[in-house]
Amino acid sequence: MHACILVVDDNPINLKLAGDLLELEAFEVRRAADAESALEMIRNKHPDLILMDVALPGMDGLTLTRVLKESPGTGHIVIVALTAFAMKGDHEKILAAGCDTYITKPINTRIFPGQVKQILADKTATGLIAEDVKMKNDVS
């Protein structure tokens, strides 16, 4: 079973493009056009990864990221900012909000699925390493 990815973007073209590219790679994709819809979807099923537009109407993507990262039930979810803002200082602002990394928009359709796969692979490797360390500590 492939990972479940939630794409949150208020631009219908971006939402469709990102979702379609990931579905072609056999990911389970859910789509939300705003923070409120995203929260409802997350309550029903926790995704493995969230691709979060930074500039959402209402609650913006960085605020939603903070809310999710501060909650014990959702703090473990990997969140990748999707942003057209790649100016000096934006990277630090995105990471400070709790995003694990970011991908700049417009997305490069040739490499986007590979970027997402790599982020998920890094998450899995980190989780396995952390679990291995925990098990070794439990045995000691």
Image: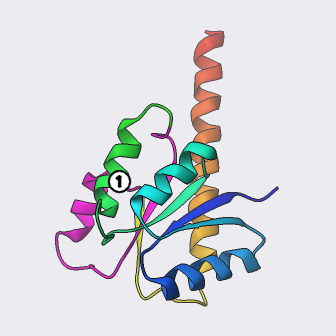
Residue drawn at x 52%, y 47% as measured from the top left: 77
Q: What span is in magenta?
A: 74-100
Total marks drawn? Answer: 1
Q: Amino acid at mark 1?
A: Leu
Disc 1 packing (10 Å; few <14; some 14–19; many ≥20): many
Residue drawn at x 42%, y 56% as measured from the top left: 36
**From where the camera sits, is residue 79 visible?**
no
**From where the camera sits, is residue 12 visible?**
yes
Q: Position of residue 93 (x, y in %)?
A: 22, 61
Which quadrant of the rendered structure holds the C terminus?
Answer: top right
Residue 31 figure quarter: bottom right
Q: In this rendering, is residue 75 above or below 104?
A: above
Residue hosting label 1: 64
Q: Position of residue 71 (x, y in %)?
A: 41, 35
Q: In the rendered view, does 134 fall on the left or right side of 107? A: right
Q: Nearer the viewer, residue 22 or 116?
A: 22
Q: In the rendered view, does 137 fall on the left or right side of 75? A: right
Q: In the rendered view, does 11 fall on the left or right side of 94? A: right
Q: Position of residue 130 (x, y in %)?
A: 57, 34
Q: How is the image coloured?
A: rainbow
Residue located farthest toward the left when viewing the structure as drawn: 89
Residue located farthest toward the top when viewing the structure as drawn: 140
Residue drawn at x 33%, y 69% as measured from the top left: 54
